Image: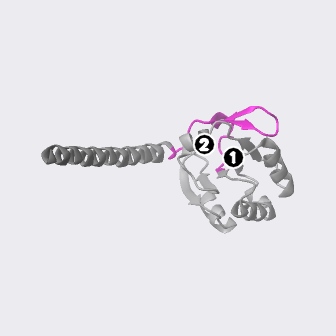
Amino acid sequence: MRKIIKFAVLVLIAGFLGYMFFRVHYKIIQKDEIAQRIKSIPKFSFFNALNKDIFTDDSIKNGDPCLIIYFNPDCEFCQHEAKQLSANIQKFSNVQILMISYVDIYKILKFRQEYHLQDKNIAFLKDTNDQFIDDFGESSIPSIFIYNKNRQLTHHFIGETKTGALLKYLNE
């Protein structure tokens, strides 16, 4: 009887270790795939909060750098980021800015108005199906992706980022 219990325990431990190895290996592969995918602007499709159209990666203006900000209107870091962006908006006149959030459209538009981000080069997009995570990987709020005019990733910031740092990588 003891041999059967020992054997069962060993099988359970081996099974658990095998499962954990598989999960870690899968996460590493998934992370590498996402890193490869975001080297250039990935294919995506989000709901435009302003005109109710679908905004895709093809909607991004060619020849302009692109700043993609994943945010939540209730996030204090996002609010501070928006204040900095608004105060320096003239420095971003040649940059396509995509503000993407998963919250209600009403909150997104209220955020846009509250932080005076009504510039024509800023698109406010709603992530209706949690597609952002599939396309760009699991991201903290705020997450900022900077793409140059050739649609290549120059930098990825996690968390609140100073305007000077954004401009430095946008101008590379």
Q: Residue at x 46, y 48 (%)?
A: 35
**Magenta span:** 38-67
Q: Tell me the amino acid under the disc marked 1.
A: Ile
| Crowd class of label 2 (few under 14; some 14 to 19; many from 20; radius 10 Å) | many
On the image, the x and y values in percent for residue 120 come to: 81, 46
Question: Tag 2: residue type?
Answer: Phe
Q: Residue at x 71, y 49 (%)?
A: 97
Helix, strand or loop at label 1? It is strand
Q: State yes or no: residue 30 in magenta.
A: no
Q: Check the image and name the residue furthest to the front.
A: 1
Residue 47 is inside the magenta segment: yes
Q: Which mark is residue 100?
A: 1
Q: Residue 91 lies in what quarter of the image?
A: bottom right
Seen in the picture, residue 166 relative to 33 is either above or below; the reply is below
Write down the residue under mark 2. 132
Name the main secondary structure of what is drawn in magenta. Answer: loop
The quarter of the picture where the N terminus appears is top left
Q: How is the image coloured?
A: one colour
Pointers 1 and 2 in contact (CB under 8 A)? yes
> Considering only vertical position in the picture, is 18 above or below 90?
above
In the rendered image, which quarter contains the C terminus? bottom right
Q: Secondary structure at mark 2?
A: helix
In the image, residue 28 sits, relative to residue 169, either above or below, namely: above
- Res. 120 in view: no
Residue 168 in the image: x percent, y percent? 62, 64
